[in-house]
Amino acid sequence: MSDFQTDDDIAGKVDGPAVPASGRTVISRKLRELYDAVQDEGIPDKFLDLLEKLDEAERKAGTSEAR
């Protein structure tokens, strides 16, 4: 089963309730709104600090291996 299915992929299969086109439109719009909201949140400072520490550790490991 693919993560991305079209209506053609599932034609003739009755695995769950049928969703009318208007319902799919509402679901698509709500998912886009949620995605946009998450995308606009930004990256928390704690996560940025962890990424910086990881970069620093990788730089140190790279210089010690080169010796």
Image (cartoon, rainbow, N blue to C red):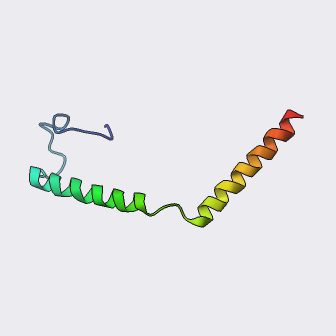
Image quadrant in which you'd find residue 48: bottom right
Q: Residue at x 68, y 55 (%)?
A: 52
| Residue 46 horizontal/vertical position (percent) | 62, 66
Q: Is residue 23 above or below residue 2?
A: below
Horizontal side of residue 64 vs 8, given as left or right: right
Q: Is residue 9 visible?
A: yes
| On-image quarter of the N terminus | top left
Q: Residue at x 32, y 37 (%)?
A: 2
Q: Is residue 53 above or below residue 14?
A: below
| Residue 19 horizontal/vertical position (percent) | 13, 52
Q: Is residue 20 visible?
A: no
Q: Residue at x 59, y 65 (%)?
A: 45
Q: Residue at x 76, y 50 (%)?
A: 57
| Residue 33 horizontal/vertical position (percent) | 29, 60
Image quadrant in which you'd find residue 61: top right
Name the one closer to the observer, 20 or 44. 44
Horizontal side of residue 34 vs 59, given as left or right: left
Name the one closer to the observer, 23 or 11. 23
Horizontal side of residue 44 vs 37, given as left or right: right
Image quadrant in which you'd find residue 37: bottom left
